[in-house]
Image: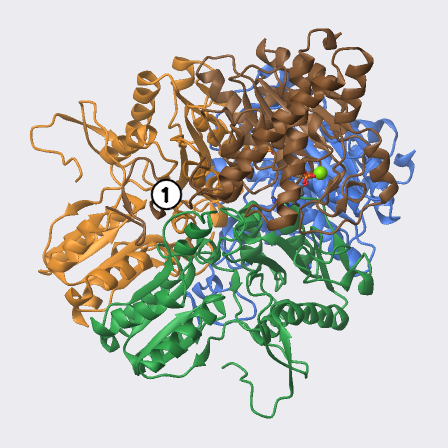
Chain colours: A blue, B brown, C orange, D green
Amino acid sequence: MVHETINHTELLEDLLLTRRFEEKVLEVYQDRGIRELPHSSLGQEAVGVGACYPLEDDDLLAPSLRTRAAMLLRTPVEEIVAGMYGTESGPSSGRTTEHHMGSSEYGILGTTGMIGSHLNPAVGAALGNRTLDNDRVTVVFFGDGASQRGEFHSALNFATVQELPVVFVIENNQWTEAMSIDKLVDVDDLADLAGHGLPTEIVDGQDVEAMVEATAEAADRARSGDGPTLLEAKTYRYRPHAETMPEHRDEATLEAWKDRDPVEMYIDRLLERDQITEAEIESIDEQLQTTIDDAFDMAESDELPDEETLYHVYKDTEIDHWKGVAK
Amino acid sequence: MVHETINHTELLEDLLLTRRFEEKVLEVYQDRGIRELPHSSLGQEAVGVGACYPLEDDDLLAPSLRTRAAMLLRTPVEEIVAGMYGTESGPSSGRTTEHHMGSSEYGILGTTGMIGSHLNPAVGAALGNRTLDNDRVTVVFFGDGASQRGEFHSALNFATVQELPVVFVIENNQWTEAMSIDKLVDVDDLADLAGHGLPTEIVDGQDVEAMVEATAEAADRARSGDGPTLLEAKTYRYRPHAETMPEHRDEATLEAWKDRDPVEMYIDRLLERDQITEAEIESIDEQLQTTIDDAFDMAESDELPDEETLYHVYKDTEIDHWKGVAK
Amino acid sequence: MSQQLDAETETTTQTIRESLNQALHEELERDERVLLYGEDVAEYGGLYKISEGLYEEFGEERVFDTPLAETSLGGTAVGAALAGARPVVEIMYADFLPIAGDHLINYAAKMYFNYGDETSVPMVVRSMYGTGDGHGLHHGQSPEAWFMNVPGLKVVMPSTPREYKGLLKGAIRDDDPVIFLENKMRYGESGPVPDEEYTISLCESDVKREGTDATIVAIGGMVYEALEAAERLSEQGIECEIVDPRTISPLDTGPILESVEKTNILVTAQEAPTFGGFGSEVAAQVIDDAFFYLDAPVKRVGAPFTPIPFAENLEEAYQPTADDIESAVIDAIET
Amino acid sequence: MSQQLDAETETTTQTIRESLNQALHEELERDERVLLYGEDVAEYGGLYKISEGLYEEFGEERVFDTPLAETSLGGTAVGAALAGARPVVEIMYADFLPIAGDHLINYAAKMYFNYGDETSVPMVVRSMYGTGDGHGLHHGQSPEAWFMNVPGLKVVMPSTPREYKGLLKGAIRDDDPVIFLENKMRYGESGPVPDEEYTISLCESDVKREGTDATIVAIGGMVYEALEAAERLSEQGIECEIVDPRTISPLDTGPILESVEKTNILVTAQEAPTFGGFGSEVAAQVIDDAFFYLDAPVKRVGAPFTPIPFAENLEEAYQPTADDIESAVIDAIET
Ligand SMILES: Cc1ncc(C[n+]2csc(CCOP(=O)(O)OP(=O)(O)O)c2C)c(N)n1
Ligand SMILES: Cc1ncc(C[n+]2csc(CCOP(=O)(O)OP(=O)(O)O)c2C)c(N)n1
Ligand SMILES: [Mg+2]
Ligand SMILES: [Mg+2]
């Protein structure tokens, strides 16, 4: 049983960090706005947290817009918040949004605003790592919406025939913006779309331990040269697609999912198994809250970046950016 | 049994027309060249012939580069040959290649030089026909190579969720240019790649009657509003990818496929069933040969198009083509 | 030439958002071959609410939501148009147009040329551009120049509510494929829109302001910036003529050349980076055909050669505005 | 400035095909991070045999064939480069680049800007263009202008064997994403290639011929046409200076401006349609920065605004040649 080898305090801490962070984002956004429009991961935390847990520190993560956990588990919280504010201390000093930022230092593959366009780059990162002859695994997160793009097919196929060390994680929250996937695909399980010959597995995305277990296996397979795996994590988001959009989903369904809240489920399980005490949880929670609050305070008083930051487009050639020509 | 309802003389004529045409192309190309580089369908004739046979005259065909049958069964032979020569009497008077020409008159969807890029347009044509409220079915042909593109996934999905009247026909000849599909996909049957919830069927592409039967069913399904079907026709080409490329495939495999030659197999069967006589075949053959020879003679003596033909880019706006601006 | 508003035309003040919604409504009603689809355009009414109410009115065969797959949007629209329908698809942000680039550049643009008969591709791709909302690198790019060197495409960038409506109707009725670019920062701009039914034909430049001292050729949202700059310059005694091409390609250069022949000074204004952009083509056309009328270097206003930055102050530094146009005109005149 | 061949350099006559093959060979050998992949590049050695023998020599982890999926080629190259490898991918025909357009425009071009550290995207996309072989609408387009308005990309179009080799090596070593365009009609051209190892840096324009009477800025295969035109014009007493930018974007305008300041006449030459093309940007740069040196309208040589036709005579009418450059120079001088 995988839960016997897990450091439960750590895993819970990861889960609580993500939950508290997302709650804070929501609170601050509603109270006074944040420059980056939040696309909340509340409700889906176990997917990213569980998938990241069994990885090595230098494995590469390619998060989707909504995989906040992946960012939080790799990047100092204050940098993330500054990234959302577009201030000087953010990872690119405000050049880019926090949603898509990349960092070789933190092992996060930069992404774009194009949903699903990171699938082939993630496969390519795995290819690059094979070329460099290291044993880093790449884990790429994407939604049910991204699975509808042709990229899903070509990336799976390329990774499979090249037997690349990739773990594909669909965060199937069953909504593509305001569209229910019921009208966007004609299958019950997105995993069925992938007949490419790679192993696929459907995972309970609310169960952080199930995510740990499935990803651990997939990462092992990748690392031992047996190629990619596709995991479909079934989950649900508690918030609308973005904080500017109204809620239009069925209330009963949402409530049913909340009954299986990933954080509460895990806490209940740990308490039941006597693997943690209420007091321990409270203390972790308090500490996390302080870290998060401090990060927001810092970002709110941070400076805007220097204009020079903008002119960071070519690494090898000096150009006159206003004319667009080489100097 | 479908073969009881088939007009065998007609079907054989279609098959022989395609075979003799392709033989003639090869002969002329080797002897004195043809402007359009031939990508021969020799060996694969039964796929296009069989799939076209059960269709209505106004059903729409979206052929691949290699589906010569689809062109021949819809377009006067002399126009096709002129199209290959790029002369005045070709369908677009030499603006475009015969490989990709489109014609609403003949019910052929124009395609491009991009393998697989016609999949979504074919689905769109079916959508357009739904909007126009007619009952035309669209049949789209494409290779194993095209099936590797993302277009395959997005087109299948769109057609499935919209329940559009499309028949997808993979002409799986097992080679993508000089690459064997063994290294390009990790499945035995390409049909397995399509887990989109639409019916799929593997068909013997050498058996013209099997193609007729499978396509008849799929077209019926489409026409009665039950949505798309995917057929995977297993076949093989006798020639290299294009006539400029050397043969590099295994000889024994090629010979094994030739043992199941689609034209010979069908003739043998008809003779066995006493549905045709050797003499009848000979007479059909002679007549076809004359038509084909005449078409080549005509094209070879045809004029080059007038330069004005070139300036046919916008339908609704007169422009100065040299400056690229509206008049 | 373009159909100008004359004094007697009855108008109502509308936002661009309203005028676009009306245009779609009228065309869906007028012609049964018109259909509208895209991501979130039906039940939700469009991310920016341009197609609100249309799904309810015209039903799911005419207005529908699609899977997240822009190659399907571009590709199926080509096919539907070739089959004889008049598809209007929304590709949410113009930044996503490259995903459908093959279908636009290699398919839509070339089928009229490729067909043996008079079949053409009457499709419209609506898409949004425009900076200033902090959406970052991938939700605001001006893509017009990516498609200018593509014979067969038409690229339209309206400016005022009246033109958004008239040109969208014109684009839907046009027999050629049209990329119709909407500035998402300007949906709320309002202005007079004729009450009577009207359309505006594509490929006709329009003079938005008359003047004798300098010509400003501005496109899309920059027309508003040019008008503002012209007001300020007028106070300094400089009268600018503003030409709004409205259709970027194929470009109606006549009114531009005529204007430059009168003013002898040319400034261009676009939101995209200057290098390789629309303004460069205008400059090149003028220097070929009106060279001896030009009194000064042509100044091009545009963004720097960088992606669109996220941070507030960086985005401000990036975005070209009325200020930049004003300085460029003064610069040109003083040279 | 560019590294010129001096008289002492030992050279061997090679075709462009050979020089490219050598460049790939040398870089694969020099740097283990370099890898080469694409459709038919390995076992078959490339459709035009540019990569012949490399698979055999470097094995299937360094040189391999891929599924038919250009978004995978573009997309995986970005990822491999971000991970620290130096991928070289072949996208067979440049007409197919739009299929990978999103990964080039929105991904490759923007990641250096997007990263929090100094990570960049050292990838090279090799692709073929060039008309004259009857391949029709979709196997010969010159795509450079589609990518010029994209900050972050580098677009390279070499002319001679020496440059093909040096620039390909330069591109592979460059830390930014490069679209490397090869004229498929010129693979057989031969010329001197230095025996010693060398590279040519990107973004440096080169003067291919000195002259005092007119400046011709020609790119890619058109450099040969410009050289021929210049010879003919020389017989008529007109001495042309030919500037070969080699890198289209970002463009090294210095040598162009200097040349125009000397000759006072500018003609541009490209294979792509004139409207919205490279030549327009050159004209615009010159009219901004060297306006007072210009004696005549800038003439741009290019194809008409149509797709590439198939028929022999139509393709001939379409293709710009030395004749057109010659007339354009005379035209400009006589204005
Ligand atoms: C290529 C592309 N198409 C459309 C969009 C607009 N868009 C942003 S998020 C989104 C929904 C994505 O759904 P999914 O992949 O399920 O991820 P989720 O938001 O549910 O986490 C859409 C359509 C986009 N950003 N990129
Ligand atoms: C998008 C695209 N990529 C690559 C090519 C080059 N190419 C032409 S035909 C071909 C092979 C196509 O294989 P398949 O789809 O199996 O069809 P077949 O030739 O076997 O009939 C390739 C790679 C192309 N024309 N278009
Ligand atoms: Mg989702
Ligand atoms: Mg094949």
Position of A205 compared to D266: left or right? right
Give amino acid for label 1. Answer: Thr
The one nearer the camera, D243 or C184, is D243
Residue at 59% over, 65% down: D187
User: Quarter containing ligand 4?
Assistant: top right
Residue B233 horizontal/vertical position (percent): 73, 27
> Does residue D137 lie above or below B156 as drawn?
below
Q: Quadrant of the N terminus of chain C?
A: top left
- Is residue D83 visible in the rendered image? The answer is yes
> Does residue D181 lie above or below B315 as drawn?
below
Q: Quadrant of the C terminus of chain C?
A: bottom left
The one nearer the camera, C258 or C272, is C258
Position of D235 compared to A222: left or right? left
Q: Secondary structure at mark 1?
A: helix
Residue at 15% over, 54% down: C258
Position of B80 compared to C90: left or right? right
- Is residue A285 visible in the rendered image? The answer is no
Give the residue number, with chain letter if any, for mark 1. B309
Residue C221 horizontal/vertical position (percent): 30, 45
- Label 1: how many residues lie within 10 Å, few (<14), some (14-19) or many (20+)? some
The residue lying furthest to the bottom in this view is D8
The one nearer the camera, D226 or A324, is D226
Residue at 14% over, 63% down: C264
The picture quadrant where one finds residue B47 is top right
The picture quadrant where one finds residue C280 is bottom left
> Does residue A304 lie above or below C71 as drawn?
below
Give the total of numbered labels.
1
Residue D236 horizontal/vertical position (percent): 31, 80
Position of C317 compared to D34: left or right? left
The one nearer the camera, C96 or B304, is B304
